[in-house]
Amino acid sequence: MKFMGYRRISGNVGVRNHVLIFPTVTCAATVAQMISREVPGTVCVTHQHGCGHLGEEKDHMIRVMSGFCANPNVAGVLLVGLGCELITPEVLIEHLRKTRQQVESLSIQNLGGTTKAVEKGIELARKLLSEAAETRREEVDLSGLIVGTHCGGSDTMSGLTANPALGIACDLLVAESGTVILSETPEMLGTEHILAKRAANDSVRRHIFEITEATEKRLKSTGADIRGTEPSPGNIAGGLSTLEEKSLGAIRKGGTSPINEVIEFAQKPSQKGLVIMDGPAHDIISNTGMIAAGAQLIAFTTGRGTPIGSPIAPVTKISSNSTLYNCMQDNIDINAGTILDGEGMIEGIGEEIFKELIEVASGKLTRAELLGHCEFAIHSIGPTV
């Protein structure tokens, strides 16, 4: 099967054609926003990182930032640095050049302050925007598509309607040689033995147990009980009672295909088909990690209602119940609650989701995009100096 996408010189395919203004350090965030406001058609992110990182966390930040900027939905990126930070534009450029990403950069200190940096940034952003406009959609194979999956604000129906329906859609994509990312390691706890049975080989099977055991050990080391946040108060209000119950529903969104690989947070898959990403369950952070790994779009199920989107990737929302859909229609793209209402079947809604994902990949705007949702976050994994 085919969809209409943007071919990149890297060989990857984008479903959007964004010019991204990206501050490499939080100190440059306001200047990046100023540039983006003056150049309509660009997108911008802000974050609190880029300096004071040590060891493993430094590598983590570089992997996430460079991966996000290299996503095939980005036609070109302008890196905005301060000049004295740990993660400078030059650090990210070293990684971006390997992906053949179109990149420009500037340093606020080297240019003499905010005003001159904004002036130069406007010039560079307009150049990138002009180059991006030369790229047109063309017919490409569905095998080039990577879909990230997430469930946020789950309720008792998420594991019975929206998640298994999304699982059907994911199986259909895998059958077309596409790639699906299943993340949220905390929401695999209690179900690791089920996932391990689907591992493509012994190495993947061991890795599944390793990431769940490491997550549980890390959580216990804090001295706090994970049940203070998993299930969340909203999950409990929606009818979920235990973490295991939530996990049993959460893993269904990945479908039934063999698990071919386990990857780190923001690591690009080396295998097609279904892969697991070791990452937190936090909605925005999870999305960021999958997009940094190359996912061009996110399929997001919800039972309580979550409006979030992404600056560079469309986020398709699927409600688990019709009450939510009727309450938040401006945020929801597909209502899987019709399964509960007796008006639809899991297989039929799954096929509808699959069709919707292809249409979104070909240019159809999601509700989150129409509303301008562009949330972005990276999590710290160590102390900041």
Image (cartoon, rainbow, N blue to C red):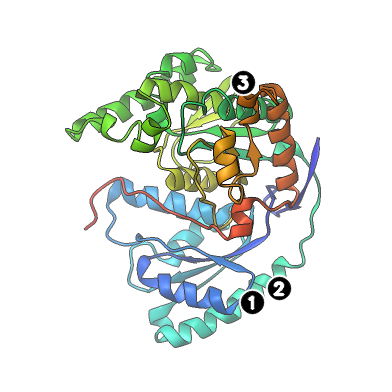
Q: Position of residue 171 (x, y in %)?
A: 66, 25
Question: The C terminus is located in which quarter?
Answer: bottom left
Q: Position of residue 237 (x, y in %)?
A: 38, 33
Q: Which mark is residue 130?
A: 2
Q: Position of residue 217 (x, y in %)?
A: 26, 27
Residue situated in front as seen by the camera: 123 or 299: 299
Is residue 291 among the parts visible in the rendering?
Answer: yes
Q: Give the residue at mark 3.
A: 257
Q: Give the residue at mark 1.
A: 126
Q: CA distance from mark 1 to mark 3?
A: 44 Å
Q: CA distance from mark 3 to mark 2?
A: 42 Å
Question: The N terminus is located in which quarter?
Answer: top right
Crowd class of label 1 (few under 14; some 14 to 19; many from 20; radius 10 Å): some
Helix, strand or loop status at disc 2: helix
Give the residue type at disc 2: Ser
Q: Are marks 1 and 2 in contact (CB under 8 Å)?
A: yes
Give the residue type at disc 3: Ser
**Going 56% across and 28% down the picture, which residue do you hit?**
163
